[in-house]
Amino acid sequence: MVSVLTSSALFKTLLFLSLCSVWLLPDLALAKHAGITRHYKFNIKMQNVTRLCQTKSIVTVNGQFPGPRIIAREGDRLLIKVVNHVQYNVTIHWHGIRQLRSGWADGPAYVTQCPIQTGQSYVYNFTITGQRGTLFWHAHISWLRATLYGPIVILPKRHASYPFPQPFKEFPIVFGEWWKADTETIINQAMATGGAPNISDAFTINGLPGPSYNCSAKETFKLKVKPGKTYLLRLVNAALNDELFFRVANHTLTVVEADAVYVKPFKTDIVLITPGQTTNVLLKAKSKTPNAKFAMSARPYATGPATFDNTTAIGILEYKKSASASSSNNMNIPLLKAKLPQFNDSTYAMKFNQKIRSLATRKFPVKVPKKVDRRFFFTVGLGILPCSKNQTCQGPNNVRPAAGINNVSFVQPNTALLQAHFFNRSKGVYTTNFPTNPPFKFNYTGTPPKNIMLDSGTKLVSLNYNTSVELVMQDTSILGAESHPLHLHGFNFFVLAQGIGNFDPKRDPAKFNLVDPAERNTVGVPSGGWVAIRFLADNPGVWFMHCHLEVHTSWGLKMAWVVNDGKGPKQKLMPPPADLPKC
């Protein structure tokens, strides 16, 4: 027998269903914008790779060089299992990710975690909050990031568009450095002898050096484009020790994003990008297929007194031919070269960096701290340290080159700083008496003082939750003025101003841009100059700050900030995960 609903029962059923849909709609709307969880597995393993006519075994993720691309959307959660199959201790840093209350997943060895030992694994667990654009991941222990790196592509939330024309296609362009020798041997020998480490043998674009190097014509990155189309190039500087100029011959680039923050678009022929920085640019292909190929060239911007790898990596931009065009003609097409600035063109560098401004729109506002709770003045530069008694160093009187901030060369602890902080066991691990100003004043960019010996120690700055910080970083001319790309973990900061010479606390603050300053995670302290930044300490944990020239980090140009828990439940650091590696 078939039951038939009465009109009254039918009405009640329809009413119930319609009410259910009203209750469910907000949840469905939320689900549409909520992130999803994405799983990745990184097997750290050795792989034979041939470059510059020579094969060597390098540390890789999943046998890939460069490593795999991570793709996520703003709001997504990432679970990345890293399994260490190599002889070295390993950690991975997700460079530029804010890591809100998830400092255990930040990655710098002995700062937020002990390294993952051979045969061990660790799951990095974090959510991408309020960020979209290009970042990258890399090893954060010793010099392993020479080959352990790859791009992070953060797409906007679903149905959210870019604040610039939608590109036809997107390509990551990752710059790196290549050594013929083993990089761990190079830095270990340099630290043992007190000398400077050997410079790289080549630069690479997506792992390939290109035709300017011996027997590397076949090892060239090629970008094929269609006439009239617009492409988004996601530039990443993953090189260890060199800032780079980048140019595509006979093409103009439009900068639209820096360090995963949208910027006011501006046109340029040449992009300057320091290690640790990322820059998204639009490239508009010519309307008709030209009878030429175009060099995509990257070469160093170098300001210091030391030798550097003065070579040029080249990729090739090619236009796709119609099917009817003969391939034989393709062999005779000329390659147009890209002209780049002089290697030490600091004027160009300064002008380029000053063009980068935040969008500062209603949708993408600029939240510069207007009032300042604490002010810091950090000198950044080189000096010397005595070598240990059982060590014979190359310098006079058995000294070695070193680097420091406010005359302190950072000593890496044997216990992770974040664990010591979280469990209130800082005694014997670190102190919180990092100097807020240099211990003595001198003409920072003029004649160096007679005593250039640094202090050393594991000193941190302690900040209360939600403290607004203003920090001026001043280059010094001790052992030579040099540009230093400084990277702050756990935060973005606002670049208020920069200048050449010594910072003047009376006059220079008048130049501060509080309207649309660049928002970044890595900034170049100008050679023989200064940069002023502000950030809000709204992320509890221990956060590393260091020069992204790896040689300077090895020499001690680093420090850390401790941001204490706030009072609210969402203002406290989460407890450590069960699989956190042990020292």
Image: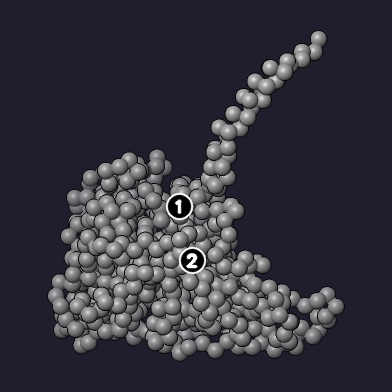
> Which image quarter: residue 368?
bottom left
Q: Residue at x 15, y 84 (%)?
A: 450
Work out which residue is located at the far top of the displayed protein and give it: 1
Please identify the quadrant where the N terminus is shown: top right
Q: Is residue 16 above or below residue 478?
A: above
Q: Residue at x 55, y 72 (%)?
A: 281
Indicate which label's residue lies in the foreground, 1 or 2: 2
The CA distance from mark 1 to mark 2 is 15 Å
Q: Residue at x 16, y 81 (%)?
A: 442
Give me the disc on residue 129.
Answer: 1
* Residue 145 rendering spot, x and y as whole percentages: 45, 65
Amino acid type, mark 2: Tyr
- Regarding residue 82, the answer to whether it shows in the image is no
Amino acid type, mark 1: Thr
Q: Is residue 488 above or below residue 327?
A: above
Q: Find numbered disc 2 in the image and state the secondary structure of the residue it sits on.
A: strand
Give me the disc on residue 187.
Answer: none
* Residue 39 rendering spot, x and y as whole percentages: 55, 47
Work out which residue is located at the far right of the displayed protein and give it: 324
- Front-most of 541 and 256? 256
Work out which residue is located at the far front of the displayed protein and give it: 8
Report the residue marked by disc 2. Answer: 262
Is residue 58 toward the left or the right of residue 399 in the image?
right
- Front-most of 360 and 504? 360
> Which image quarter: residue 285?
bottom right
Is residue 479 toward the left or the right of residue 280 in the image?
left
- Front-most of 569 and 153? 569
Q: Residues within 10 Å of mark 1 (few under 14, many from 20)?
A: some
